[in-house]
Amino acid sequence: MARKRPEPVEVVKARRENALSALVEAVPFIQFLGVEFDRRGDELTGVLPFRDDLIGNPLLPALHGGVVASFLEITSIVTLSWHYLWEDIESGAFDPVKAAGGQLPRLPKTIDFTVDYLRSGLPRDGYARATVSRAGRRYASVHVEAWQDHRHKLFAQATGHFLMPPPEPSE
């Protein structure tokens, strides 16, 4: 019995990129802050490109705490959604065209989100990576860390708990 031939790498990459774009473009606040995502396989890194209007304290200058918290929460939710939808994306069941048209799967809802501000966010690009600690059918726990120049010099970190969306009804 012959094994099924694997899909060309270009097809797989395009499917993953389209799915990530659909997730990010479905939330207007992500565009407002300008958050982008760098994808390497199944790992996502959130990128917050620096803009002058993100400064909260011009005397330091430092990134606004609300911008930092939002960046961490966005990274957590997108990473958790990516984790949650991975099998559908890989099997081709996730339709980015439908998602771009507003039929995005339901996203996790925040139960609580605790941010630790470790140092001032400097006026430069920020990066964040989230780790899904626990993902069940109803509840998920995520830890996220943010840095700027050096991966091991964090300027903020957070832990969040999320209510997972119920399974989509079969059509």
Image (cartoon, grey):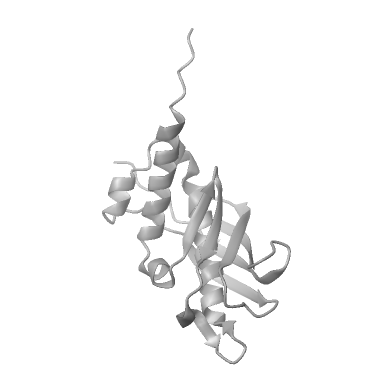
- Residue visible at 28% across and 56% down in the picture: 102
Q: Residue furthest top?
A: 1
- Residue visible at 57% across and 77% down in the picture: 123
Q: Residue furthest bottom?
A: 59
Residue 23 lies, with reference to residue 73, above or below; the image says: above
Residue 164 lies, with reference to residue 117, above or below; the image says: above
- Residue visible at 26% across and 54% down in the picture: 101
Point out residue 107 in the picture as x, y percentages from the top left corner.
Answer: 43, 58
Point out residue 116 in the picture as x, y percentages from the top left corner.
Answer: 67, 75
Q: Residue furthest right?
A: 152
Question: Does residue 16 show up?
Answer: yes
Please tell me which residue lies in front, 45 or 106: 45
- Residue visible at 48% across and 54% down in the picture: 81
Please tell me which residue lies in front, 76 or 34: 34
Residue 50 lies, with reference to residue 19, above or below; the image says: below
Residue 136 vs residue 86: left or right? Answer: right
* Quadrant showing the C terminus: top left
Point out residue 98 in the picture as x, y percentages from the top left corner.
Answer: 28, 48
Residue 157 vs residue 100: left or right? Answer: right
Residue 61 vs residue 4: left or right? Answer: right
